[in-house]
Image (cartoon, rainbow, N blue to C red):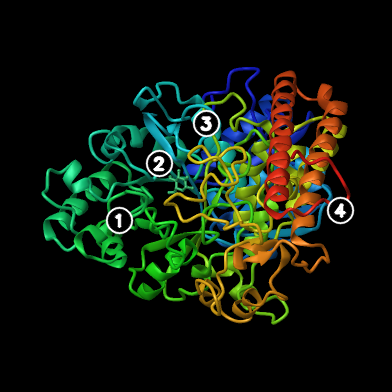
């Protein structure tokens, strides 16, 4: 009697296993609203699994769930004795956890806030801290829009597969060119997302093929079904749309945003969607990017393109997420003046102030493309008159493709905490990335795989993304702890998994591309090393290694001028060799191999040291895992062991290829005399 079908027994429930605790808690729910039914179903599931019983009426309860608008009414009854005043002024999505003599009250700012409060309490129940925390905890999301983008195609794309950059099997939503019949796992997925605070999802790839384009029209029924499932978890759905849809679907001769017929087609199409899905989130658009159509085709700029779509959804309260990932993907490698890193800024900053209120410009966190290390995109600090989203990749396109364990929360946390005024200058919250954006968005890593994410440990990234989007100040290690506590029962297993994953991003960086230079991956698939794979291609992703040195000169003085896109103090810090942070040195500068880093090491020795250390660290990870693998559920244990074997093989390949490449190029020997293949 839940509003969602249960997962088949034995299926991997990720971080929502059925029973957080056996016990005799008396739970009471008071409130009204569509999401209250969801909370009721959650409680029914808990009690059904033996966590206690649901009580009502005048029965005394150990835990009361309610919404702020009822607090007064309940003040002398169920909430008697609680510090109800501290729950006043909660935001809609916020909640309070109140405690009083061993009893708990979870009060939501609205039914949505209560759903988030329920999941917060459930995590505490699981780790044993529900009953004895502070008298009043108040929570509210730092960012209003917390969104996942699916790069799912309906049919299998000949090159990209079904999910572009997907490493978890086929799509959770679609199979064989149609919506799946059985959407049981989508129900559970929506619960998983809601439990971390995600409130929006885009249902199809930003590269929109002709079949997927029809989700807007002929196949809208599929979207309606998915919207219903996500709605029950407080999540609004979006569609990625093809800018040429009026031509593809509407038979118009053009998609020119200045053409009134085009604008009208979009308005009519939006009206039809909202008639079926009143809480539809809006559109997501990749335009004039990597071959996708866009306003440039008609000599219009991106504000004209975005605003035309925004006006179609505005009457319904919809949003347009417009991606800033626009660059020349057909550049000539001989041309050293074109710098892909500059592109988003050059295209979009001049348009600041020109976007409608319901347009959100979605900017990748770095100026290039989801590399293991990049500086923060300067666009985020340069568009005060535009609503912005920071875009991340939970899917591990460039970070080991879910074959490698790589916990990415430390990277995201660094980006969200980046202060455009410089920590020591003290710009404070308002100049931090998290304070400058209206939305935090990421590409999902989920698919049809029985462990959801390919690597069972990649579930930690999905969980952590939602938690950080909710509260960018959370410590990545604390989130990791929350995740293991929610996911695994065995205490020793939890400790070792935290130990393994905590610094795994650093480890991945150590054995892959050094010092912020990026890439060095196999072209196309982006997995495994190929140092020169992209060096003479049109993609604008070069390292410029020669026998003297390596790196991209992006200075104003002698390079592409990219450092000039930052405000002070960053423009000056990145510009000067001695103040440029080591980890980004080769992103900003071309230096000799013998250049000494701030760490005192030479660049070449740093490359050798980190590559040997990275592989050693993976060996330690594998050894530590072997000591606890028997404590994990058998299918998880087997999958993790397989993935670790591949991670180790691949890390060795990275180490060998990079150390050999740079020893051949530089002719400089390893100071420690370790074996490097000639
Ligand atoms: O990282 C690149 C990927 C493309 C992707 C593109 C984008 C969806 O390699 O597969 O296309 O970014 O973000 O649009």
Is the residue indicated by label 2 positioned so its CB lies within 8 Å of ligand 1? yes
- The residue beneath circle 1 is 316
In the image, residue 50 above or below residue 396: above
- The residue beneath circle 4 is 671
- The residue beneath circle 3 is 447
Distance between the alpha carbons at the discs numbered 2 and 1:
23 Å
The quadrant in which residue 422 appears is bottom right
Specify which label sits upstream in the sequence, 1 or 4: 1
Q: Classify mark 2: helix, strand or loop.
A: loop
In the image, residue 666 above or below residue 501: below
Q: Which mark is residue 18?
A: none
Specify which label sits upstream in the sequence, 2 or 1: 2
Q: Are marks 1 and 4 in contact (CB under 8 Å)?
A: no
Percent of width and height locating residue 222: 33, 32
Q: Classify mark 4: helix, strand or loop.
A: loop
Percent of width and height locating residue 644: 73, 30
The reply, left or right, for residue 315 in relation to residue 390 is left
Using the image as rendered, state which of residue 3 and residue 500 is in the foreground. Answer: 500
Distance between the alpha carbons at the discs numbered 2 and 4:
48 Å
Q: Classify mark 1: helix, strand or loop.
A: helix
Asked whether residue 59 is in view, the answer is no
Distance between the alpha carbons at the discs numbered 2 and 3:
13 Å
Is the residue indicated by label 3 positioned so its CB lies within 8 Å of ligand 1? no
Using the image as rendered, state which of residue 410 and residue 196 is in the foreground. Answer: 410
Specify which label sits upstream in the sequence, 2 or 4: 2
Distance between the alpha carbons at the discs numbered 1 and 3:
31 Å
Q: Residue at x 36, y 68 (%)?
A: 357
Q: Check disc 4: other Cα within 10 Å, few if <14, some if 14-19, many if 20+.
A: few
Q: Are marks 4 and 3 in contact (CB under 8 Å)?
A: no
Is the residue indicated by label 4 positioned so its CB lies within 8 Å of ligand 1? no
Q: Which mark is residue 205?
A: 2
């Amino acid at each position: 009697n839940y509003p969602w079908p249960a997962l088949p027994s034995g299926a991997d429930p990720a971080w929502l296993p059925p029973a957080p605790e056996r016990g005799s808690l008396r739970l009471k729910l008071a409130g009204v609203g569509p999401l209250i039914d969801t909370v009721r179903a959650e409680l029914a599931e808990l009690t059904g699994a033996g966590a206690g019983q649901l009580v009502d009426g005048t029965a005394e309860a150990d835990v009361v769930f309610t919404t702020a608008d009822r607090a007064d009414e309940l003040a002398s009854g169920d909430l008697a004795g609680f510090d109800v005043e501290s729950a006043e002024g909660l935001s809609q999505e916020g909640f309070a956890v109140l405690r009083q003599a061993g009893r708990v009250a979870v009060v939501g700012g609205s039914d949505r806030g209560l759903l988030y409060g329920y999941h917060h309490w459930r995590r505490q129940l699981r780790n044993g801290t529900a009953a004895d925390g502070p008298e009043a905890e108040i929570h509210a999301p730092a960012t209003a829009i917390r969104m996942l983008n699916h790069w799912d195609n309906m049919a299998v794309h000949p090159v990209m597969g079904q999910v572009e950059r997907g490493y978890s099997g086929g799509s959770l939503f679609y199979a064989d060119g149609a919506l799946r019949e059985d959407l049981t796992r989508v129900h559970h997925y929506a619960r998983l997302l809601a439990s971390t605070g995600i409130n929006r999802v885009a249902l199809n790839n930003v590269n929109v093929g002709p079949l997927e384009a029809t989700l807007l029209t002929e196949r809208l029924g599929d979207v309606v079904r998915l919207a219903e499932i996500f709605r029950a978890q407080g999540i609004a759905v979006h569609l990625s749309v093809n800018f040429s849809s009026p031509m593809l679907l509407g038979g118009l001769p053009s998609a020119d945003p200045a053409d009134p017929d085009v604008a009208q087609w979009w308005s009519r199409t939006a009206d039809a969607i909202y008639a079926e899905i009143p809480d539809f989130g809006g559109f997501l658009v990749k335009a004039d990017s990597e071959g996708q159509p866009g306003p440039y085709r008609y000599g219009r700029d991106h504000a004209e393109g975005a605003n035309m779509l925004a006006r179609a959804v505005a009457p319904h309260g919809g949003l347009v997420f417009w991606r800033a990932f626009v660059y020349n993907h057909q550049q000539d490698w001989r041309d050293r003046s074109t710098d892909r890193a500059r592109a988003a800024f050059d295209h979009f900053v001049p348009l600041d102030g020109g976007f409608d209120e319901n347009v959100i410009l979605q900017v990748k966190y770095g100026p290039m493309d989801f590399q293991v290390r990049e500086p923060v995109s300067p666009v985020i600090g340069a568009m005060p008159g535009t609503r912005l989203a920071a875009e991340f990749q939970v899917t591990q396109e460039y970070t080991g493709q879910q074959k490698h364990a790589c916990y990415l929360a430390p990277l995201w946390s660094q980006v969200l905490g980046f202060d455009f005024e410089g920590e020591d200058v003290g710009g404070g919250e308002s100049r931090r990335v998290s304070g400058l954006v209206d939305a935090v968005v990421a590409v999902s890593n989920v698919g049809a795989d029985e462990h959801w994410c390919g690597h069972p440990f990649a579930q930690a990234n999905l969980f952590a993304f939602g938690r950080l989007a909710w509260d960018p100040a959370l410590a990545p290690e604390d989130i990791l702890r929350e995740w293991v506590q929610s996911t695994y029962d065995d205490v020793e297993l939890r400790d070792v998994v935290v130990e393994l994953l905590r610094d795994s991003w650093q480890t991945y960086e150590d054995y892959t591309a050094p010092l912020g230079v990026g890439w060095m991956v196999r072209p196309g698939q982006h997995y495994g090393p190929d140092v020169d794979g992209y060096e003479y291609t049109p993609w604008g992703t070069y390292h410029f290694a020669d026998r003297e040195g390596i790196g991209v000169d992006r200075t104003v003085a002698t390079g592409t001028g990219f450092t000039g896109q930052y405000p002070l103090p960053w423009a000056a810090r990145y510009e000067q060799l001695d103040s440029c942070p080591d980890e980004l040195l080769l992103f900003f500068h071309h230096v000799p191999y013998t250049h000494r880093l701030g760490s005192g090491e030479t660049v070449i020795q740093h490359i050798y040291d980190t590559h040997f250390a990275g592989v050693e660290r993976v060996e330690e990870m594998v050894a530590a895992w072997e000591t606890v693998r028997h404590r994990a559920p058998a299918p998880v244990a087997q999958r993790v062991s397989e993935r670790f074997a591949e991670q180790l093989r691949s890390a060795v390949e990275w180490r060998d290829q990079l150390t050999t490449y740079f020893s051949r190029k530089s002719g400089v020997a390893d100071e420690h005399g370790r074996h490097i293949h000639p």
